[in-house]
Every structure is written in C-alpha cells, then in structure tokens.
Amino acid sequence: MKNDLTEAMYISIGKIVNTHGIGGELKVKVYSDRLERFEGMEQVYASPDEHADERRVLTIERLRYHKDMVLMKIKGIDDISQAEGLKNVFLQVPEDELPPLPKGRYYIYQLEGLSVWEKGRCYGELKEVLQPGSNDVYVVSDGKRDILVPALRTVIREVDLDKGRMEVALPAGLLEIYE
C-alpha cells in the first residue's frame, strides 16, 4: 500500500506475536525463509495493519533467536507493559530496501494478484500464498471457487511480473477435486 507522505510501498517482513520475559523483549514471527532476516538492520517500521499508511519507526537494540522466532529488543521498550502495546504489529521496510532475490525467486507480495493460466485457460487470480511446510501452496480464485496449486518447479512454468501472469501445468486430476 502506498504511503501518501512518501509514496513508498512498505512490505511486511515480520509480525510481533508476543512478548518475551519482563524486560520488554518481543517475539517476532519472520516472514522469510531466513530467520536472520533482521541481522544488520538498525530500524524497522511498525504498522498496526499490513495496509495502513500509519507507521512508527522502531530502533532495534539487539536480536537473538529462540526456536523459529526472533527475540527483538527495541530501544525505549524496557518492560513487559510497554512491549504488550506492540503485540500483533507488523514490522515493515520500504520495498527498495528489500534484498534482491535470485532469478526465479519472488517475494509473496509480487505473486499475489497474478492471473494464473494454463494453455490459454485462465483459472483466476493468485489470492494468497500458504506456507504449510515442505512447499508453498498458491490459492487461486476465480470468484466462485478456490484451487490450491502446489508451488513446485514441475507445476509453475513461468512467472511474468510485468504482464501480471503465471503459467502453470497442473498435475493430472487436480481440477477434478474442485468440480
């Protein structure tokens, strides 16, 4: 979503899901396949909603890791009551601060909204990317039904961000599940 003041697009890279301890640490779910996503960052933008224009700058004091989460200490957040106020807040960066991805890899926000095609037939729009485990799953909707498409190299044939289009080769029998 564009910010009216800066015209920059902000991308969520994590979400504060809870507090940790009494010293103001925050438990962050990272929206990346790299848990170290926040390493080297000095600040991040906090937004109550992924698409809100209102943001607050947070300065990162330190990071550490616990299981599949990042424990983050923010400057000025020194006790659990202050930390509680940041629960469920999205952590964002301007789009131009995202690191480039290798060829053939895409950020989720780039994929959502693409039309999904197979041999001249449009199945609908990629509405959501699910991350249940071993591979992502794309939720493709035509407005009447959703089709779950496995994000595998054998299925996803081409992604053209400029044309807003994805070409697929659905596994045999997949469509019959939804009819």
Image: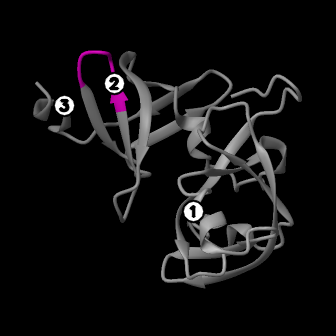
Q: What distance separates the C-alpha of mark 1 from that of mark 3? A: 45 Å
Say if the magenta span includes residue 144.
yes
Q: Toward the viewer: 177 or 13? A: 13
Question: Label 1 sits on what residue type?
Answer: Glu
Q: Nearer the viewer, mark 2 or mark 1?
A: 1
Q: What distance separates the C-alpha of mark 2 from that of mark 3? A: 13 Å
The rendered magenta stretch, by its main secondary structure, is classed as: loop
User: Would you say 10 lies left or right of 125 here?
Assistant: right
Say if 55 sits above or below 53 in the image. below
Q: Which residue is mark 2?
A: 141
Q: Which residue is mark 3?
A: 175
Q: Which residue is mark 1?
A: 84
Say if 60 sits above or below 150 in the image. below
- Which residue lies at the image location 25% right of the left edge and 42% below the top edge? 171
SS under mark 2: strand
Q: Toward the viewer: 175 or 54? A: 54
The C terminus lies in quadrant: top left
Q: How is the image coloured?
A: one colour
Q: Position of residue 37 (x, y in %)?
A: 69, 67
Question: Label 2 sits on what residue type?
Answer: Ser
Question: Label 3 sits on what residue type?
Answer: Leu
The magenta-colored residue range is 140-145
Quadrant hosting residue 5: top right
